[in-house]
Image: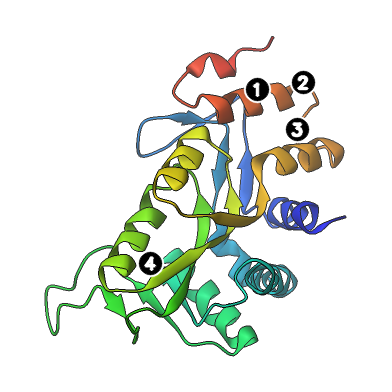
Amino acid sequence: MNLQEQIAHDLLSIQAVFLRPDEPFTWASGIKSPIYCDNRLTLSDVQVREDVENGLAELIRTHFPAAEILMGTSTAGIAHAAITATKLNLPMGYVRSGAKDHGRGNQIEGRIEKGQKTVVVEDLISTAGSCLEVVDVLREAGADVLGIVSIFTYNMRKAADRLEAAKVVNHSLSNLDTLVDVAVSEKYIQPADKDRLLRFRDNPQDENWMKQL
């Protein structure tokens, strides 16, 4: 297996990803989804955690070799940023979802210098809204954001359009397309479900993806 397939296998094996095309989950947005992803579970499995952190480190070495600091998204990206930064011998910090209402009122935790070449570490990219908020905060603080690394992306068009508009590149360890292929080969889902999952990816607001063609 290549890296994308290995991470997809890992996520499925520890049930960090659930695929339920016949009993979809409801996201906070109200969208009916055949997939639910909880990458926090990767921290609880030693081998999967090692695969993920080695993979994130390799993405940074390959795509962002000039990186000077890693910044995790709060809260899911914090642990991954810390472990990966240790592997790369880089400083790290994280960005809160909002400024603290006490103390110094920080939103960025950790020291970051103006112009410092920064990589954001995220666990999951769906519509890319939350990670781009982090990018905006870092840019406002003067950081030179090189891009994002993440564990998994749904490969949604909305995310791709948002990232392009913000002039930010994301590199994920795995993605929905790869995961669906692995799920079929390892019999987590039936081959007929593959098309339904990919139709959801292309238009999550259209609940017609639930229909068997």
Residue 205 occupies which quadrant of the picture?
top left
Pick whichever, 18 or 31, lies toward us. 31
From mark 2 to mark 4, how far is it between C-alphas?
A: 37 Å
User: Extreme bottom residue here?
Assistant: 89
Q: Callout 4: 10 Å neighbours few (<14), some, many (20+)?
A: some
Secondary structure at numbered mark 1? helix
Q: How many marks?
A: 4
Do residues under tags 1 and 2 come within 8 Å of each other at their CB atoms? yes
Q: Which residue is mark 2?
A: 192
Please state which amino acid type lies under the numbered disc 2: Ala
Please state which amino acid type lies under the numbered disc 1: Arg
Q: Which residue is mark 4?
A: 74
User: Extreme top residue here?
Assistant: 213
Dot label at residue 148 = none
Q: Which residue is mark 1?
A: 196
Q: Which residue is mark 3?
A: 189
For the point 59% across and 87% down, the residue is 86
The image quadrant where one finds the N terminus is: bottom right
Pick whichever, 127 or 135, lies toward us. 135
The image quadrant where one finds the C terminus is: top right
